[in-house]
Image (spheres, rainbow, N blue to C red):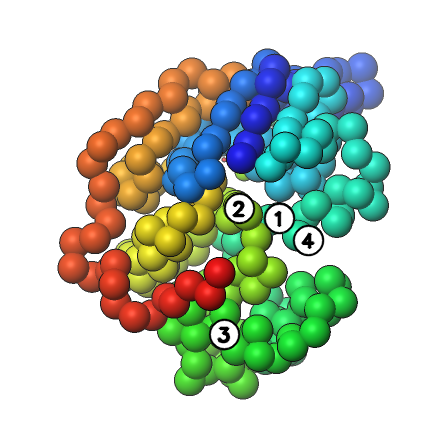
Amino acid sequence: MIEIADITKVYHMGDMEVRALDGVSLNVDAGEWVAIMGPSGSGKSTLMNIVGCLDQPTTGSYRLDDLEVARMNDKELAAVRNHKIGFVFQTFNLLSRTSALANVELPLVYAGARDRTTRALDALARVGLSDRVHHRPNELSGGQQQRVAIARALVNQPAIILADEPTGNLDSRSGAEIMDIFCDLHSQGMTIVMVTHDPDIAAYCQRVVHILDGRIKEDTRSTEQRCGNGSNGDNGVIKGNE
Ligand SMILES: Nc1ncnc2c1ncn2[C@@H]1O[C@H](COP(=O)(O)OP(=O)(O)OP(=O)(O)O)[C@@H](O)[C@H]1O
Ligand SMILES: [Mg+2]
């Protein structure tokens, strides 16, 4: 699904050169759930921006779902982003004056899709928010706002979900509810890449990639899974429609 080969990302600040990524190679298979960890400034967000087609590497190759995206222009990148990627951010990034439903419809508006309301309602049902569709973000709890953001990420039926610290602004209980939703998505075969500082969150993922100074230092897989301990799995909240 993701094939990154020896990419660099170099920023020039006056005379200074910042090598935010310095020879990163990473393959992620369809259906994998990967955590990206590393200290502040190590290059995690830079890598996520490239994986998410928000930015281009300076050198190297990036194939996403068999498309070479590293040399695409902005318009082509935007199209790939809209069709293949769902983003979830630490700060939710919802439009504040707009209902949950309208927030989730927004990617469909950009895509010029039909059946927008039906599809947005379906996505909100998948995250268990059918009873909050007309609420605005300030009328929702933090965990509920993040669920709206996940519904927005899902509504275009992306190939990958990218999440940068999705539980960073949540208390541990709301965070666990969000992780239950990711567990359900993973069990349905979604490919997920997630940045986190929290080892408890990383423990949900079967693979953890550690980054330091723009390089991959460690790439470990575990067979242990925190999902499926009764609080999630087949709880009926998520129903796949693919
Ligand atoms: N637009 C930019 N221009 C110049 N330097 C940048 C830019 N974006 C990031 N950097 C630099 O690249 C390096 C990696 O930044 P990045 O945001 O990827 O770190 P991070 O691992 O996400 O950190 P954090 O955990 O604090 O979010 C840092 O040294 C940062 O200062
Ligand atoms: Mg970051």
Gap between marks 4 and 3 measured at Cα: 18 Å
Label 4 neighbour load within 10 Å: few <14, some 14-19, many 20+: many
Q: Is residue 129 left or right of residue 20?
A: left
Q: Is residue 114 left or right of residue 230?
A: right
Label 3 neighbour load within 10 Å: few <14, some 14-19, many 20+: many
Residue on which the image places disc 4:
82
Image quadrant of ligand 2 equals top right
Gap between marks 2 and 4 measured at Cα: 11 Å
* Contact between labelled residues 1 and 4, with CB atoms less than 8 Å apart: yes
Mark 4: secondary structure: helix
At x 33%, y 23%, the residue is: 220
Residue on which the image places disc 1:
84
Q: Is mark 4 within 8 Å of ligand 2?
A: no
Mark 2: secondary structure: strand
Picture coordinates of residue 226, whole percent (x, y): 22, 45
Q: Quadrant of residue 68?
A: top right
* Label 3 vs 2, first from the N-terminus: 3
The kind of residue tagged 2 is Ile
The kind of residue tagged 1 is Lys
Gap between marks 3 and 2 measured at Cα: 19 Å
Picture coordinates of residue 116, whole percent (x, y): 65, 75
Q: Is residue 122 above or below residue 5?
A: below
* Label 4 vs 3, first from the N-terminus: 4
Q: Is residue 135 above or below residue 51?
A: below
Residue on which the image places disc 2:
160
* Contact between labelled residues 3 and 4, with CB atoms less than 8 Å apart: no
